[in-house]
Image (cartoon, rainbow, N blue to C red):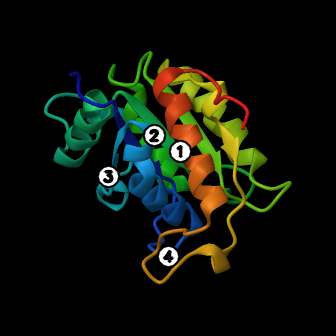
Amino acid sequence: MSAMPLVLLLSGSLRAASTNEAVLRTAQAVASSAGVRAVRYEGLARLPHFNPDDDTDPLPASVTELRAAIGQATGILICTPEYAGTLPGSFKNLLDWTVGGTEIGDKPVAWINAAAPGRGHGAEAALRTVLGYTGAAIVEPACAELPVDRGMIGPDGVIEDAQVRRRLCDVLGALATGKAPAPA
């Protein structure tokens, strides 16, 4: 029996109580139902400011950890807020550190837009642009808009809504297989 695919969950938010973090905690909780393992990357705040002069061996330890996590993953699922019409600076910094590495090249990547309807499209457009520079393989059927209201999040930081959890399973399955989920 082969091991389940490993999906790395990347949050673009530094806020522990953000809806983006809740989406990824929930994705991690339902991952086995989608036939995948999921691990949340929690080193965003530890990454140094990107400087191309520092993108040489030896890399800062936090960058080495990030690139190793990406390299070990079968696919990557991103959930990021939009800030001032684009990606938050800290998350753009994370992505900048991936440009010089080869780990993300051809890696299946998707994102969840957890913003209110009609919002978050600037972050999606920026993600598409930056991921294009990294050589990541965007899995369109796994990219989804899944609006999350703070009232949907339980005290444990996980979303209990059955429809949201089902959609997250669909997203993880589509990311792992590259195929859209079958209609219900």
115 or 85: which is nearer to us? 115
Q: Name the residue beneath numbered marker 1.
A: 169
- Circles 1, 2 touching at the beta carbon (< 8 Å): yes
The answer to whether residue 74 is above or below residue 84 is above
Which of the two marks, 1 or 4, is nearer to us in this view? 1
Mark number for residue 116? none
Binning the other alpha carbons within 10 Å of mark 1 as few (below 14), some (14 to 19) or many (20 upward) gives: many
Q: Residues within 10 Å of mark 2 (few under 14, many from 20)?
A: some
Label 2, on which residue?
34
**Mark 4 to mark 2 CA distance (whole Å):** 25 Å
Taking the image as shown, residue 31 lies to the left or right of residue 142, namely: left
**SS for callout 2:** helix
Q: First in sequence, mark 3 or 1: give its number.
A: 3
Marks 1/2: CA–CA distance: 5 Å
For marks 3 and 2, the one nearer the N-term is 2
Q: Nearer the viewer, mark 4 or mark 2?
A: 2
- The earlier-in-sequence mark between 1 and 2 is 2
Residue in front for this viewpoint, 63 or 145: 145
Residue at mark 3 to residue at mark 1: CA–CA distance:
33 Å
